[in-house]
Amino acid sequence: MAFLVLPLAGLLVRAPWSTLPQRLSEPQVLEALRLSLVTASVATAVCLVLGVPLAWLLARTDFPGRRLLRALVTVPLVLPPVVGGVALLLVLGRRGLVGQWLESVSGFSLPFTTAGVVVAEAFVAMPFLVIAVEGALRAADVRYEEAAATLGASRFTVFRRVTLPLVAPGVLAGAVLCWARALGEFGATITFAGNFPGRTQTMPLAVYLALETEPEAAIVLSLVLLAVSVFILVALRDRWVGAAA
């Protein structure tokens, strides 16, 4: 227990509480916070658009290679984030398999841009959403969907009017976990998008940079991330406790 609690206690003890409001209002802190909130929110939206249909495919259909697809979806959970960033560079970089074609066609390059931050965060965070939504879909009573289908509803209507309301708590929990993971992403972001203030420097990257030059600013940013983590745990506590019961 002490092994888990003492590092957090040390962070709270060493925090510059007397100058905390001033530190939180510093331009570099506000800019890192703003960029983190924006990119994490956009990455979560991307994960919702791509992840919910993917979770439905894994939970509601049976096709050759489904087990392999599920394994591939969960790879970012165990893959070191830096390796994920390298993989993104090899695919979406200027000389990557897709990136060189994208740049030649549109003149746009993803690496070292704010859009690159979103891509890196979505890559590492999407498994949290897919797993949560797939679990909710498997636990949902399919008789409601079957009844709607027998009444003449199309598959899309059944999904929109019946399935989504049934699994809404699971989607919400997955989205919150996805957002929190995107907010705390470091390795893939710094590898694929770099560390440029105002453009790609999110809060975890700002913590890393400030720790070398201004430790108090690093502690303040760490406190913000800690507060977000505690909020997520409290918000999802009832769902986890209910599931365990």
Image (cartoon, rainbow, N blue to C red):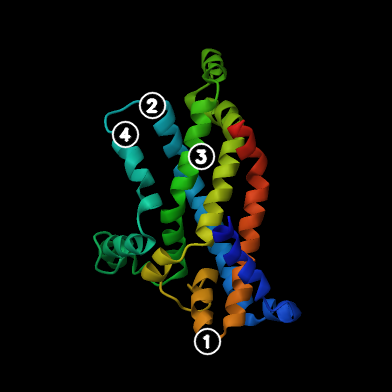
- Under circle 3, the secondary element is helix
Give the left or right position of residue 67, taking residue 31 as reference: left
Which of discs 2 and 3 lies nearer the camera? The answer is 3
Compute the Cα span from label 1 to label 2. 53 Å
Q: Is there a contact, CB below 8 Å, between mark 3 and mark 1? A: no
- Give the quarter of the image for residue 227: bottom right
Mark 3: amino acid: Ala
Local crowd size for mark 2, using a 10 Å CA cut-off: few (<14), some (14–19), many (≥20): few
Compute the Cα span from label 2 to label 3. 17 Å
Numbered circle sitting on residue 132: 3
Which of discs 1 and 4 lies nearer the camera? The answer is 1
Across and down, in percent, residue 154 comes to 50, 23
Task: Name which residue lies at 55% across and 28% down.
Answer: 163
- Give the quarter of the image for residue 115: bottom left
Give the left or right position of residue 91, taking residue 120 as reference: left
Local crowd size for mark 3, using a 10 Å CA cut-off: few (<14), some (14–19), many (≥20): many
* N-terminal label among 1 and 4: 4
Query: The C terminus appears in which quarter of the rendering?
Result: top right
Q: In this view of the protein, can residue 39 be seen by the observer?
A: yes
- Under circle 4, the secondary element is helix
Decide: is 242 above or below 86. above
Query: The N terminus appears in which quarter of the rendering?
Result: bottom right
| Pick the front one: 125 or 7 | 7
- Under circle 1, the secondary element is helix
Numbered circle sitting on residue 67: 4
Compute the Cα span from label 3 to label 1. 40 Å
* N-terminal label among 1 and 2: 2
Q: Which residue is mark 1?
A: 213
Compute the Cα span from label 4 to label 2. 12 Å
Q: Which residue is mark 2?
A: 61
Compute the Cα span from label 3 to label 4. 17 Å
